[in-house]
Amino acid sequence: MQCMMHWTGAGKVVGPGKAMGHFGSHNQLNKLSDKWKEPKEAQKPDVNGGGTKVTKPTMFCHHPHGVVAIGPCSMGSKLGNNPRAVVAPACLSMPFCRQMMECLGMVSSSRPAMKKTMREGKDLAIIPGGVEEVVLASSKVERSYITKRKGFVKYALQHGYDLVYHLGETSLFDVVYPLDTPVMLKARVWLANKFSLATGVGFGWPFLPLVPKPDMKCVTVVGNRIAMPTVEEPSREMVEKHHAMYVEALQRLYYEHRALHPLYQSRALELW
């Protein structure tokens, strides 16, 4: 398992064996892929945190989702062995959206689809926070919906996947008031839990609100691989143990590297 964190703003690359970062500009949406041209080292981050060749499949976990999840989309196949992106079943139920996502090789986050893909041993890219993290997205507070999200850890144990984590991207859009107030936030999270419904409006560039803020840049920080055993039927205690390891690594990655982004230097990470 490996996690990655993705911030919006200026930053620098951290050396191999630790977390890796990259520059990513959203000034022109049609040049998103240009960010991989410099620095050169960012094109193939050392997701092992050491350089040892790893043959086990990997689940790349992105935090947080953000309003649109531009961070994980821009990462694309730059990590791992061309990982397949996991998306909400609702995304594969919408006309045009389904055809586009299927052409890109995306798979549903439903249990049957996930298990089928993992039995094939293919690398996966997933946003564990899901629709709840869309609701929690804020340009003022960094939040991750992870305390109760443990199914991905169980799947990783069952199918012998390591985990990789990364962070990012909550400053590309502003959430329209009063949707980010405590009362409205709790109500929206309840709707997300109950009906898998992401309610809210993100406001990016004033002249074209659906486009991210053009003056923002992104920094992705990749954490060290979390090695997982293969256990066909992991106990609840084992899942809890490895989930706690994951959450601890996620927090450590954030606090050790938030200084890469001026807006995040004093911003705490809220765990939901």
Image: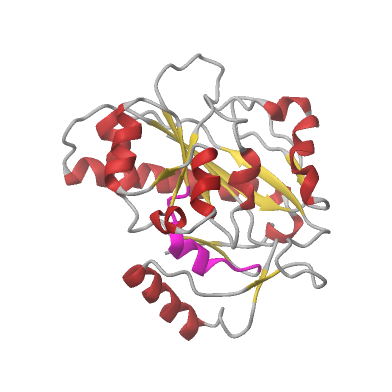
**In the depicted structure, whether residue 168 falls above or below residue 164:** below
Q: From which residue to which does the magenta span run?
A: 127-139
Left/right of residue 256 with respect to residue 161 in the rendered view: right
In magenta stretch: residue 135: yes
Q: Measured from the top left, where is residue 70 in percent x and y?
A: 64, 51
**In the depicted structure, whether residue 40 falls above or below residue 31:** above
Left/right of residue 26 with respect to residue 108 in the rendered view: right
**In the depicted structure, whether residue 129 falls above or below residue 210:** above
State the residue at coordinates (25%, 43%): 239
State the residue at coordinates (43%, 29%): 58
For this rendering, which residue is in front, 99 or 26? 99
In what quadrant of the picture does the N terminus appear? top left
Q: Measured from the top left, where is residue 3 in percent x and y?
A: 50, 40
Left/right of residue 230 with respect to residue 91 in the rendered view: left
Q: How many marks?
A: 0
State the residue at coordinates (78%, 57%): 216
Q: In this orientation, does residue 252 appear?
A: no
For this rendering, which residue is in front, 36 or 269? 36
In magenta stretch: residue 71: no
In what quadrant of the picture does the C terminus appear? bottom left
